[in-house]
Image (cartoon, rainbow, N blue to C red):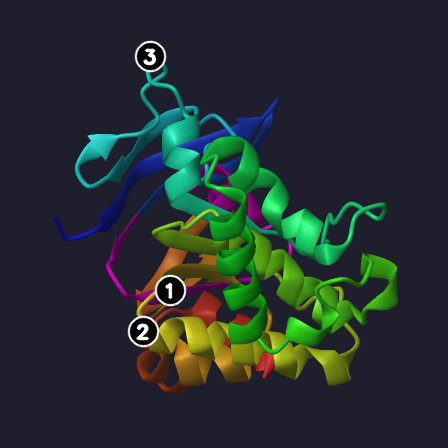
Amino acid sequence: MTLKLELKEVYKSFGALKVCRGISMTVDKGQMICLIGASGSGKSTLLRCINLLEEVDGGQILLDGQDITDPSLDPLPFRRRIGLVFQSFNLFPHMTVMENVMLAPRRVHKPPKAQLIAETTQLFERFGLADRMKYYPDQLSGGQQQRVAIIRALAMKPEIMLFDEVTSALDPELVGEVLDVLRQLKSEGMTMILATHEMGFAREAADKICFLDQGIIVEAGPPQQIFDAPKQDRTREFLSRVL
């Protein structure tokens, strides 16, 4: 079956604050979609809704045609298919980074210990951190910690990866190493949705850009169209401030 994620008129409010106001989008297998927009435009909340960390107030989120927001369904099997990496690394400081990565797969998938160690080691090797597996989080740079957070999400073998401003907490010189990981995942065919302020990266790597403002998608299209010939005044105004 071809993986497909579809959002239909998704609404989410926190009290009187309407954060997502009827967002619709389609993500096909292997696509990288970049969500851009000012802070507070709804990007992070939308990602949390897709991962089912937030309950939607209206609309549907369909994964391979199944409405995963149906309250009668157990969200956990769907969350395992959709990995989410946050701005903050959220690594347990008292555990080595290898132990951090193995924790969830050991509890959820319960593989044989030798298999789990081998798979975890392979992930660290793949992303250039094999020599840091036995280190504790505070012994690593911010960029290395964020790469570990990505490895931890990948250890659950998700089909879709969501990234919420994963470079925003990093020093500028560390941003590149995390963006390189995202480029590598794209080259390997991972389906991804990123909320990002890295406009150069979005222009270069995304298949589609969605510009959000006040909880709606104002404009969506290929990077060249959005960055070089935006159709909406609001998009032009935003880009003139950030580029």
Residue bearing mark 2: 207
Residue on which disc 1 sits: 33
* Mark 2 and mark 1 residues within 8 Å of each other at the beta carbon: yes
Residue at left offset 47%, top offset 47%: 156
The answer to which of marks 2 and 3 sits earlier in the sequence is 3
Q: Is residue 34 magenta?
A: yes
Q: Is residue 193 visible?
A: yes
- Mark earlier in primary sequence (2, 1): 1
- x, y percentage for residue 78? 37, 34
Q: Amino acid at mark 2?
A: Asp
Residue at the extreme left of the image, as rendered: 1
The answer to whether residue 64 is left or right of residue 166 is: left
* Lateral position of residue 226 relative to residue 114, left or right: left
Local crowd size for mark 1, using a 10 Å CA cut-off: few (<14), some (14–19), many (≥20): many
Q: Nearer the viewer, residue 67 or 58?
A: 67
- The answer, for residue 53, to whether it is visible in the render is no
Which of the two discs, 1 and 3, labels the residue nearer the N terminus? Answer: 1
Residue 17, picture quadrant:
top right
In the displayed orientation, state which residue is furthest to the top: 72
Residue 43 point in image, percent of width and height: 52, 51
Return the x and y of residue 151 as percentages of the image width and height.
Answer: 56, 60
Q: Nearer the viewer, mark 2 or mark 3?
A: 3
Residue type, mark 1 in image: Ile
